[in-house]
């Protein structure tokens, strides 16, 4: 005959431990997904810079649309379009710099498609040689990113150290 009293404590400990440990592992897994998405967004910005340099070498001006860049970027729909393109949980918005509307400069913003789930930071990049900046708008990320009229780096944004 099975002595149930013997198993009450180990079963209780297993249930309590599972109730504590499993959420911790789930949170860690989610954080790793968010970090992977953020790293992919930064990688995409670096690729954007490379393609802009190629475009400039060929055309003596920077591209003013994603389509101009060709390749995978040609299919990107801007953050403000009806069907913005998601890339690893991020959406992109391209700007022609205010100093010269002829394509003499560029800027791009990468925004989490769903704040907290796909990413936390909004990334900003303008012109070659400039650092990538990041800023956490919090739950107002979507609203804030859609209201931006011209490219800017928010006060308090931090420069990202790239290898």
Image (cartoon, rainbow, N blue to C red):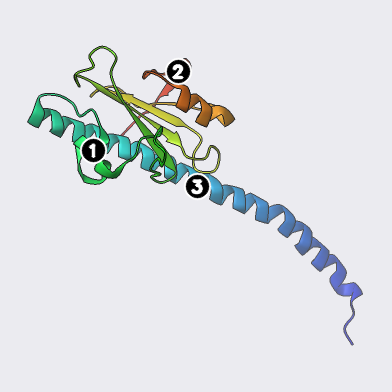
Callout 3 crowding tier (Cα within 10 Å): few <14, some 14–19, many ≥20: few
At a point 90% along the width and 80% down the height, the residue shown is: 3
At a point 80% along the width and 67% down the height, the residue shown is: 11
Question: Would you identify the image quadrant in which residue 104 lies?
Answer: top left
Q: Which residue is mark 1?
A: 67
Q: Is residue 19 above or below residue 77?
A: below
Q: From the viewer's side, name the closer residue of 101 and 21.
A: 101
Which numbered disc, 3 or 1, marks the residue that appears first in the sequence?
3
Q: From the viewer's side, name the closer residue of 22 and 69.
A: 69
Q: Is residue 59 above or below residue 11?
A: above
Residue found farthest to the top: 99
- Spatial distance from mark 3 to mark 2, Cα to Cα? 26 Å
At a point 43% along the width and 44% down the height, the residue shown is: 37
Horizontal arrangement in the rendering, residue 114 relative to residue 161 (left or right) = right
Callout 2 crowding tier (Cα within 10 Å): few <14, some 14–19, many ≥20: few
Q: Which residue is mark 2?
A: 154
Horizontal arrangement in the rendering, residue 23 relative to residue 62 (left or right) = right
Residue 80: horizontal and vertical position, in percent?
Answer: 41, 32
Residue 106: horizontal and vertical position, in percent?
Answer: 26, 23
Which numbered disc, 3 or 2, marks the residue that appears first in the sequence?
3
Question: Would you identify the image quadrant in which residue 123 lies?
Answer: top left
Label at residue 125 = none
Q: From the viewer's side, name the closer residue of 82 and 32.
A: 82
- Spatial distance from mark 3 to mark 1, Cα to Cα? 32 Å
Q: Which residue is mark 3?
A: 32
Horizontal arrangement in the rendering, residue 12 relative to residue 158 (left or right) = right
Which numbered disc, 1 or 2, marks the residue that appears first in the sequence?
1
Q: Nearer the viewer, mark 3 or mark 1?
A: 1
Residue 22: horizontal and vertical position, in percent?
Answer: 66, 56
Q: Are marks 1 and 2 in contact (CB under 8 Å)?
A: no
Residue found farthest to the bottom: 1
């Amino acid at each position: 005959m099975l002595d149930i009293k013997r198993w009450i404590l180990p079963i209780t400990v297993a249930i309590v431990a599972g109730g504590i440990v499993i959420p911790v592992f789930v949170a860690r897994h989610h954080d790793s997904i968010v970090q992977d998405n953020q790293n992919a967004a930064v990688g995409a910005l670096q690729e954007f810079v490379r393609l802009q340099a190629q475009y400039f070498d060929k055309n003596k001006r920077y591209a003013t649309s994603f389509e101009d860049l060709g390749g995978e970027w040609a299919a990107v729909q801007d953050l403000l379009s009806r069907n913005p393109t998601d890339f690893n949980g991020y959406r992109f918005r391209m700007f022609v710099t205010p100093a010269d509307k002829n394509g003499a400069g560029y800027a791009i913003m990468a925004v989490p498609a769903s704040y907290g789930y796909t990413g936390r930071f909004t990334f900003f990049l303008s012109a070659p040689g400039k650092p990538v900046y990041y800023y956490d708008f919090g739950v107002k990320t979507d609203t804030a990113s859609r209201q931006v009229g011209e490219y800017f780096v928010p006060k308090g944004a931090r420069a990202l150290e790239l290898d």
